[in-house]
Amino acid sequence: MRATAALITALAFTVAGCRGSSSGGGGSSSGDNITGTINVFAASSLTESFTTLGKQFEHDHPGTKVVFNFGPSSGLSEQITQGAPADVFASASTSSMDDVVGAGDASNPTDFAKNNMEIAVPPANPGHVTSVSDLAKSGTKVAVCQAEVPCGVAAAQVFTNAKLTVKPVTEEVDVKSVLAKVQLGEVDAGVVYVTDVRAAGDKVKGITIPASVNATATYPIAALSHSSHSATAQAFVDYVLSSAGTSVLSAAGFLGP
Amino acid sequence: MAERRGDINRRLLPWPLAVPAAVGVAFLLLPLIGLIVRAPWSALPSILTDRDVLAALRLSLISATIATGVSMAVGVPLAWALARVRVKGISALRALVTLPLVLPPVVGGVALLLALGRRGLVGQYLDQWFGITFPFTTAGVVLAETFVAMPFLIITVEGAFRSADRGLEEAATTLGASRLTVFRRVTLPLVAPSLVAGGVLCWARALGEFGATITFAGNFPGVTQTMPLKVYLALETNPDGAVALSLVLLAVSVLVLAGLRDRWLRPGTPL
């Protein structure tokens, strides 16, 4: 009974706290008020680099906490337009960002990075994949992202550019799931981002896709209009765009916007 | 029915119980009402006759039915053993085989990959010796569903075996029937209602399986993309489609409950 009462009190405070801070944020949106917890919804290909950036940001701005929700950009944009408590959205495609802007949840997104595609194979390369055209061979098990998410769109673009008909064995929810299937050795190859191959270290081997057939994903970022910590959210966006942010991203293999 | 006796007690529910009970009812029913109210009724026919949707529905029905068949073939003898064999450690075994009841299905999917995947404990030999791999195949879907759903059958049927009248079996034995004949002609008919209830429950659980399936079998339309996967993936790009598909699964669930109402849902039925 006492526990229930405590829980209710805590909930009441949380609700009151949210209201208080959102009205406060509206009052002083000009922004030296960089504090509090922000929820950053980011494409799963940003998992490693944004986790690093988040830690650096928290270190530079004591009193802040960055909580990440990594996932497929299309799924994240759906969550945001459905009212998920997000403060920043970093998408792996302009179209997912456009959905969020179109719903009135963000304005003026800024492109902050580009990413190319690469083929990831298990270290032993059981399917003997050495080029893009090997993916079209029958008997080669290929994993791609499903067509709805940016990495799936980019993979399809690569196949079109190379004039190949590739029949994947699975269309995974997001790029990290594709990478996982490669790491487990369940597929012979997966089409992922250059940055994913680098982040996976020696757990996968990368097969370069020639620039002539490669596809590029553009990453826009925006602070969200309904953020309850808009100053902190904007500060995080600025940090990603700063030279410190750019150096983390380029170390991860991202290209400049 | 013998339920009349409870009427006096039932009429007067004191408010400290009635209020939370009403909250419970609202909480359980509200999401379903939301689903029905927000359903894109006018677009429903076109969504439901979509080729991909029909493929997903077909795959779901077939794989759930096969998974139930496999569960019956393996699970009923196992349930019998758990109920009747008296050796040390049988209760630990019972706990272990019913573990998937409480295990998060995604964990089940990961475990299946590590055991039966192409690099798995057993899977690597299946691949090397016979060229059999399960991930990304419909057989993989069936395995994932069986893993998650079979314990529902086992636990239901085991309870029935346990409470079945042993006197009838003994009578048959004294009249000269072999143990197998007794099992087939006496024990099985005795537990038939539970067999049906467990089978339907198992089938429904298999039909709704998501986590183990997407983890172990992957996602490809027509091969491994069952209805729950389709619903989840549709939500990101085509929310109306996701709602329509959810309605179909809801309708199936309601049918299952309607079919079970006497056997499984009688108040006080032990699990």
Image (cartoon, coloured by chain):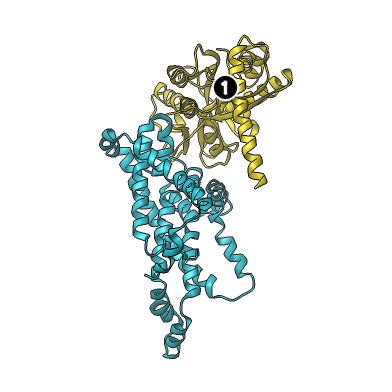
Q: Is residue A49 left or right of residue B58?
A: right
Amino acid at dot 1 = Asp
User: Outermost residue toward the top?
Assistant: A30
Viewer-proximal residue among A140 and A38: A38
Label count reads: 1
Q: Residue at x 59, y 76 (%)?
A: B86
The residue to which callout 1 is attached is: A87
Q: Chain B hue?
A: cyan
Q: Is residue B224 left or right of residue B52?
A: right
Viewer-proximal residue among B43 and A91: B43
Q: Chain A hue?
A: yellow
Residue B260 percent location from the top left of the image: 37, 60
Viewer-proximal residue among B22 and A78: B22
Q: Is residue B177 left or right of residue A53?
A: left
Q: Residue at x 59, y 62 (%)?
A: B95
User: Outermost residue toward the bottom?
Assistant: B175
- The answer to whether residue B225 shows anywhere in this view is no
- The answer to whether residue B194 shows anywhere in this view is yes
Q: Chain of mark 1?
A: A
Residue B266 percent location from the top left of the image: 42, 64
Residue B44 percent location from the top left of the image: 28, 36
Q: Residue at x 61, y 38 (%)?
A: A8
Quadrant where the image shows the N terminus of chain B: bottom left
Residue B181 percent location from the top left of the image: 41, 81
